[in-house]
Amino acid sequence: MFCTGLVAVVRCPAWSRGITRARSALAQLYTVMEAELEGIRGAGTWKSERVITSKQGAHIRVEGSSGAIVNFCANNYLGLSSDPAVIQSGIDALNLYGAGLSSVRFICGTQNLHKDLEAKIAKFHQREDAILYASCFDANAGIFEVLLTPEDAILSDELNHASIIDGVRLCKANKYRYKHLDLSDLEAKLKEAQKHRMRLIVTDGVFSMDGDVAPLKEICDLSDKYNALVFIDECHATGFLGPNGRGTDELLGVMDRVHIVNSTLGKALGGAAGGYTAGPKALVDLLRQRSRPYLFSNTLPPPVVGCASKALDLLMDSNTIAQTMASKTKRFRSQMTAAGFTIGGMDHPICPVMLGDARLASSMAEDMLKRGIYVIGFSYPVVPKGKARIRVQISAAHSDQDIDQCVEAFVDVGRKHGVIS
Ligand code: PLP
């Protein structure tokens, strides 16, 4: 038996006192953590994870639910996560190149497969060069501190993704946070930032919680006027926005005016994992030398590279899949609005059904699942307090029937909860 209490500590050998202290540290950890967890439960913002027992796709199987469930909350915008050609390419890469490299890129983690994918990404975005990361979170965390010094300035939209916020925190440049999509505030901050050596404007191309699109043309006009660089995070645009699916910069006609694009392979481009920076060659060269998530984290596994590479081939051959998105999105948005729901954002396939209350969002999502529709309630800290919502995401893989079924379920559930009459 271990010694406990003051008297025992006095009588016990030193090793035993160490164990007693370790136990009390653990007990303290439990007290502190349990209080935090209780706070989250009490606020109604607890995020439980449902277990999927099939491939990702428009129709999935979910533990605890019978039959096929229609999935409306994956970032699987083009349905490529379970595309047979994408899966086969992953299998081929696994067979040819193995499970992984057991190394970072600069030691012995670079295969021709990685170089080919980087070249393909640069070509897709029409930028000089590209560099792969294990995720776009890493790409965002690893770029700003390399690019900017205390002599420079970074101007970031207040609603940028958490990974951009973390990347900005790590960087030593002078920080300016401008109001969401507010060009006058950005201009005021740009004026103030003229005293610094370089200026970088940082924005999501599409904001993931609201589906609103950054006014890139106007941002680029300001960047010309105030001599600033422009960076966009294209996670919710790559592969499907713009006439050729190149992203927000293509949609808004500024591909040659946005300097740096960060994006993910984990959403429309096959949905496995991985992220990248595409931009000027000198920047990519420097990131390979200095970017910490690139230098100190394992190479992207070959099967993941194989899947993304095939997804890009498919998109570069034809973008007919991407073109079906707009009409599907319109179908959902117009039917929901007609039913009396408030849908945030613009014409993007991210369609936030605005509800306000966290508990309402999560209990409506539970009721939707009972009607065969998989959606999730989003609440604080993922979205601001009081702005809870169910974020519906339309995919090219949804049929019109799927969309109508989703709207019907929302109408039933919305009436039950008094959201619509
Ligand atoms: N940026 C945005 C806007 C995102 O929505 C996400 C993912 O949710 C990321 C970055 C991170 O991407 P990844 O999943 O590749 O790390």
Image (cartoon, grey):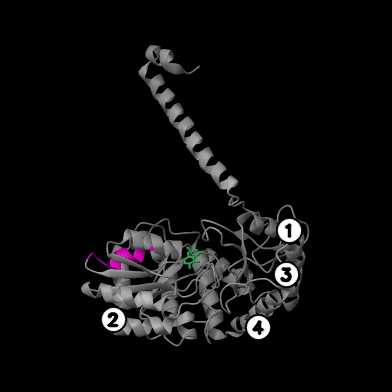
Quadrant including the C terminus: bottom right
Asked if marks 1 and 4 touch (Cβ < 8 Å), the reply is no
Q: Secondary structure at mark 2?
A: loop
Above or below: residue 255 compared with residue 391: below
Image: magenta residue range = 141-150
* Label ID, residue 327: 4
Q: Secondary structure at mark 3?
A: helix
For disc 3, the neighbor class at 10 Å (few under 14, some 14 to 19, many from 20) is many
Where's residue 21, x and y in %?
41, 25
The mark that comes first in sequence, 4 or 2, is 2
Q: Name the mark nearer the viewer: 2 or 3.
A: 2
Q: CA distance from mark 4 to mark 2?
A: 38 Å
Where's residue 292, x and y in %?
33, 59
The mark that comes first in sequence, 3 or 1, is 1
Could you tell me which residue is drawn at 28 percent across and 81 percent down? 226
Q: Quadrant of residue 345?
A: bottom right
* Label ID, residue 367: 1
The mark that comes first in sequence, 1 or 2, is 2
* Label ID, residue 226: 2
